């Protein structure tokens, strides 16, 4: 079964569309809720840390926003994918289609939110006085890098969750930790050159955020070599996690 | 050897499910489940030594008491599960209708659910779009088009789902007890659809407890008993054997 088959693409589209419709109807603010949550976090962190950090970090509000937007995408998309095979167990058990469609449709709604949020970041950067520059054309590359990261983590988590049911709790703890080991509200210099520096360097999410800030705050292109190195790592991990997912797929129906 | 007329060939196939609970924790996993190569601890047999060949265009009835292995066999043919022994060879696209309306969403409207369910069943969007009115009309739900699915009764949902599923064009269609919901009128309408399938070149396997339905629609029948292949062949002779055993037991 090939995922590129048009009927599976149709299923992906219909499931994504259904999720959008459900979200729009689920509350008064509907679609806006997905943006309000990160904005409230940005507001809170800005109120807490701006007095101390605004002098050290340029455009601190924008700096925070970029960090939160990227973290929120990663956390929401991967968090929603963890138990997707279990929560849609009737389809996992009886649906004759590649099960990655379920993971992909769960990620897609969050990816669309992320694209809209990143566009808002660009507009806010322009309004803040960063100025329009050619490096902004590289923003889609950051979206692709983030998507690759989200995809491999989601495929791996969703397939492991079928066998390890407490993975959801473990992952929620990890996401909480990730918030603090990612330079969202502090700068790289804040952690010094000790072990914290290596933790940040080993964190792929931190790299995506730094690439985005280089473009939207410094107004220049990120280090292309660094970018392609990170992309190569994530793409390799995506291939690996997809293979693991496909290898485990024939056992999903018996175990959900 | 896979005959050119053959759609499904099952040889010496056995399947056992693990008794171990799937609700594993990371602790248990680390403790050794995976380190022991994931070998199932004391599996219970679901199917044993199944040998059948189904030709293109065959309409197969799959009968047997609850727990005989009918649903497991359909899942194995659909590729949703792997056999422990033997082989299953399938030629052509497969669709499994295990529960009518599986994947439909309460909060969406009828029309939205028709598109969604059509996609789940592998029906082309263009086909659903061009037949949308007819699908809702067949289900006799014209006045509910914009209503949410949650406002429909179980029978009405089954009608809508079956009406959509009629447009499945897969070469091999597997149906697991699809006629359990719905009133007499609905069942009669469904039987008309199945009558139409009789002439089709597509292959069908119907798992059913309704022996009259099997007798009317199926050319061949497979009788499973506690996971074993009790009989496979001409529907009339298999049903006679099945019914005589039932009488003998009572």
Image (cartoon, coloured by chain):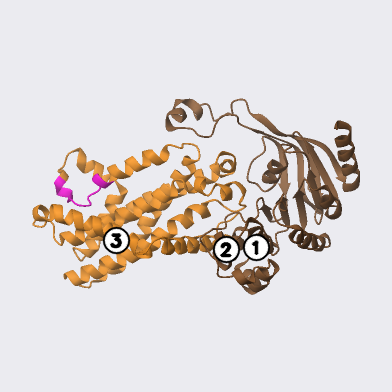
Q: Quadrant of residue A176?
A: top left
Classify mark 3: residues with Cα within 10 Å, few (<14), some (14-19) or many (20+). few
Cα distance between the residues tagged 1 and 2: 9 Å
Magenta residues, start to end: A179-190
Q: Please indicate whether residue A198 sits to the left or right of residue A101 in the image.
A: left
Which residue shows up at 85% across the image and 36% down it? Answer: B246
Q: Please state the horizontal and vertical placement of residue B228, each as a whole percent of the image.
A: 77, 34
- Labelled disc at residue B160: 1
* Numbered label attached to residue B113: 2
Q: Is residue A149 left or right of residue A246?
A: left
> Which shade of the palette goes to chain B?
brown
Q: Does residue A189 belong to the magenta stretch?
A: yes
Q: Colour of chain A?
A: orange
Residue at mark 2: chain: B
Q: Which numbered disc flags the more N-terminal residue, 1 or 2?
A: 2
**Mark 1 Cα within 10 Å, few/some/many (few <14, many 20+)?**
many
Q: Gap between marks 2 and 3, in whole Å?
A: 30 Å
Give the x, y percent position of residue B131.
66, 72
Q: How many marks can you see?
A: 3
Judge whether B25 appears above or below B223 on screen: above
Residue A137 image offset from top left, x and y in percent? 30, 69
Chain letter of disc 3 in the image? A
Residue B62 visible in image: yes
Tag shown at residue A36: 3
Q: Secondary structure at mark 2?
A: helix
Quadrant of the rendering where the N terminus of chain B is positioned = top right
Q: Are marks 1 and 2 in contact (CB under 8 Å)?
A: yes
């Amino acid at each position: 079964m090939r995922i590129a088959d048009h009927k599976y693409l149709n299923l992906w589209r219909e499931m994504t569309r259904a999720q959008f419709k459900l979200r729009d109807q689920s509350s008064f603010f509907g679609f806006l809720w997905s943006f309000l949550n990160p904005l409230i976090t940005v507001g809170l962190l800005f109120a807490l840390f701006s007095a101390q950090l605004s002098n050290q970090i340029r455009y601190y509000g924008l700096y925070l926003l970029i960090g939160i937007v990227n973290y929120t995408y990663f956390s929401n998309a991967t968090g929603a994918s963890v138990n997707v095979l279990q929560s849609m167990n009737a389809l996992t058990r009886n649906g004759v289609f590649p099960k990655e469609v379920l993971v992909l449709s769960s990620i897609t709604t969050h990816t669309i939110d992320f694209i809209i949020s990143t566009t808002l970041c660009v507009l806010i950067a322009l309004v803040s006085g960063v100025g329009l520059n050619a490096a902004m054309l590289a923003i889609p590359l950051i979206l692709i890098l983030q998507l690759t990261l989200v995809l491999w983590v989601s495929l791996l988590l969703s397939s492991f969750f079928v066998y390890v049911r407490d993975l959801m709790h473990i992952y929620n703890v990890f996401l909480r930790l990730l918030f603090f080991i990612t330079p969202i509200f502090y700068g790289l210099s804040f952690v010094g050159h000790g072990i914290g520096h290596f933790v940040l360097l080993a964190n792929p999410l931190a790299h995506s955020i730094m690439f985005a800030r280089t473009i939207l705050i410094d107004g220049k292109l990120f280090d292309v070599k660094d970018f392609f190195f990170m992309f190569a790592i994530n793409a390799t991990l995506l291939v690996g996690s997809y293979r693991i997912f496909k290898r485990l797929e024939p056992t999903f129906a018996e175990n959900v | 050897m896979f005959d050119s007329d053959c759609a499904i060939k099952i040889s010496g196939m056995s399947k056992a499910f693990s008794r171990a609970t799937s609700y594993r924790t990371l602790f248990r996993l680390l403790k050794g489940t995976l380190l022991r190569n994931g070998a199932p601890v004391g599996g219970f047999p679901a199917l044993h030594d199944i040998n059948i060949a189904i030709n293109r265009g065959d309409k197969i009835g799959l009968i047997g008491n609850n727990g005989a292995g009918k649903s497991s066999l359909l899942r194995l043919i659909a590729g949703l599960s792997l056999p422990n022994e033997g082989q299953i060879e399938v030629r052509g696209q497969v669709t499994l209708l295990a529960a009518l309306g599986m994947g439909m969403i309460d909060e969406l409207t009828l029309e939205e659910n028709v598109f969604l369910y059509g996609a789940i069943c592998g029906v082309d969007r263009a086909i659903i779009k061009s037949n949308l009115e007819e699908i809702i009309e067949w289900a006799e739900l014209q006045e509910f088009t914009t209503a949410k699915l949650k406002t429909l009764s179980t029978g009405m949902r089954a009608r809508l789902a079956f009406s959509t599923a009629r447009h499945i064009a897969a070469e091999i269609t597997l149906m697991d007890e699809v006629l359990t919901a719905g009133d007499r009128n609905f069942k009669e309408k469904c039987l008309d659809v199945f009558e139409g399938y009789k002439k089709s070149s597509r292959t069908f396997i119907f798992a059913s407890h309704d022996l009259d339905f099997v007798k009317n629609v199926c050319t061949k029948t497979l009788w499973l008993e506690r996971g074993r292949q009790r009989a496979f062949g001409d529907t009339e002779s298999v049903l006679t054997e099945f019914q005589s055993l039932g009488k003998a037991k009572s």
